[in-house]
Image (cartoon, rainbow, N blue to C red):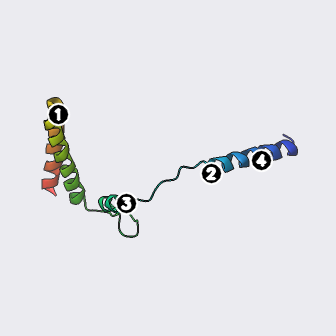
């Protein structure tokens, strides 16, 4: 490649990068309710919970999902969910 071709290639790459930077999606800041339910502290850093706390949160989510499945009468999914719940509960009890 000649120096002119290299220069054109560099310019094309620079233009492409500039286009991508102007097309980046923007997002809205979290509402106070969303912020409260995320695992972040007041400075926006991720909170590191203990394994037991994480398992407790998962068990709560599975319980809520179980109630939804009962209302929708999806019993096959309910049995699978119950197996997962039992495994997590056993691990939670061991901690």
Q: How many numbered marks, from 0 up?
A: 4
Q: Secondary structure at mark 4?
A: helix
Residue 80: percent from left, percent from top: 18, 35
Do tag 3 and tag 2 residues touch (Cβ < 8 Å)?
no
User: For the residue carrying disc 3, how many other residues have a C-alpha within 10 Å: few (<14), some (14-19), or many (20+)?
Assistant: few
Q: Where is mark 4, residue-wise?
A: 11
> Can you name the residue that lies furthest to the bottom here?
42
Name which residue lies at 18% across and 46% down.
64
Instruction: Please indicate, yes or no, whether residue 60 appears anywhere in the rendered image.
Output: yes
Q: Where is mark 3, residue-wise?
A: 31
* Label 2 or label 1, whichever comes before in sequence order: 2
Give the label on residue 21, or none. 2
Q: Where is mark 1, residue-wise?
A: 72
User: For the residue carrying disc 1, how many other residues have a C-alpha within 10 Å: few (<14), some (14-19), or many (20+)?
Assistant: few
- Distance CA(mark 3)–CA(mark 2): 26 Å
- Distance CA(mark 4)–CA(mark 2): 15 Å
- Distance CA(mark 1)–CA(mark 4): 58 Å
Name which residue lies at 30% across and 59% down.
37
Name which residue lies at 13% across and 44% down.
86
* Label 3 or label 2, whichever comes before in sequence order: 2
- Distance CA(mark 3)–CA(mark 4): 41 Å
Do tag 1 and tag 3 residues touch (Cβ < 8 Å)?
no
* Label 3 or label 4, whichever comes before in sequence order: 4
Q: Nearer the viewer, residue 42 or 1?
A: 42
Single out the mark in the foreground, 4 or 2: 2
Single out the mark in the foreground, 2 or 1: 1
């Amino acid at each position: 490649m000649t120096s002119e071709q290299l220069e054109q290639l560099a310019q094309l790459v620079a233009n492409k990068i500039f286009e991508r930077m102007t097309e980046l999606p923007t997002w809205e800041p979290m509402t106070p309710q969303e912020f409260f339910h995320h695992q972040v502290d007041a400075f926006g850093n991720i909170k590191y919970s203990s394994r037991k706390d994480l398992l407790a949160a998962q068990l709560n989510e599975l319980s809520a999902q179980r109630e939804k499945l009962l209302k929708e009468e999806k019993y096959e999914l309910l049995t699978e969910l119950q197996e997962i719940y039992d495994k997590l509960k056993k691990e939670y009890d061991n901690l």
